Image (cartoon, rainbow, N blue to C red):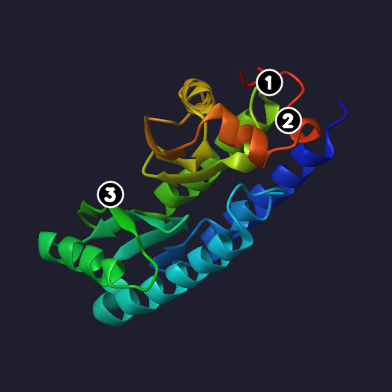
Amino acid sequence: MTRSPRRLALATLAAAALAGSLSACAPLVIGGAAMGALVAVDRRTSGAQLEDEGIELRAAARIREAMGDRAHVGITSYNRQVLLTGEVPTERDKQQAEQLVQRVENVRGVLNELAVMGNSSLAQRSADTLTTAKVRASLVDDKELYAGAFKVVTERGTVYLMGRVTQREADRATAVVRTVGGVQRVVRVFEIITEEELRQLVPQQSRPAGAAQPR
């Protein structure tokens, strides 16, 4: 069976990400960096992408300084909207993490999805890495979607979808992801744009071949 370059890249990257998760147990996870390497075209401006990287690094440093290794916190910034996932030992820690991130320069909002519980196991994190890879592959395979528009984060079987997408794309992606094995729940953290905005962002030749044409 012949695989497309995108599928081969995905498989290679997923294997590398899984190997990394098996060799280290770093408590902080920044932005799904491995999966980000697959994104050929980003709907954020280059300035916004740099801001998001800076937000993730500064937020990680602040949480690490405050909590050390006793918490497992994932930090993902998309267009200055920050998603917090993972586990912290107390409700107070959960609120502190949110407050620390809210005070980071350029942050415009925080979605706090931290769970108050013990840190997830290595087996759970490995399973989440594989689920993310399967979700990304499903988005790549769907002819009505452009996978580069989506950022995927998985935590304990819950898949978070981020990106600047139309309502049509959001609904289609949600339906696709819900059919992927290992996905227990889908949480949408989208910035919804109009079809007209999509036309301005994405040239005609860059749209998926089977995608519906914006009206």
Mark closest to the chain's N terminus, 1 or 3? 3
Q: Which amino acid does the dot numbered 3 rest on?
A: Glu
10 Å neighbourhood of mark 1: few (<14), some, or many (≥20)?
few
Q: Position of residue 75 (x, y in %)?
A: 40, 61
Identity of the residue drawn at 19% across and 61% down: 94
Judge depth for marks 1 and 3 and give the one in front: 1
Q: Is residue 195 left or right of residue 68?
A: right
Q: Position of residue 128 (x, y in %)?
A: 46, 44
Q: Is residue 127 left or right of residue 99?
A: right
Q: Which amino acid does the dot numbered 2 rest on?
A: Arg
Report the front residue among 153 and 47. 47
Q: Secondary structure at mark 2?
A: loop
Q: CA distance from mark 2 to mark 1?
A: 7 Å
For disc 2, the marked residue is 207
Which of the labelled discs sits on residue 85, or is there none?
Answer: none
Q: Secondary structure at mark 1?
A: loop
The N terminus lies in which quarter of the figure? Answer: top right
Q: CA distance from mark 3 to mark 2?
A: 32 Å
Pointer 3 with pointer 2, Cβ within 8 A: no
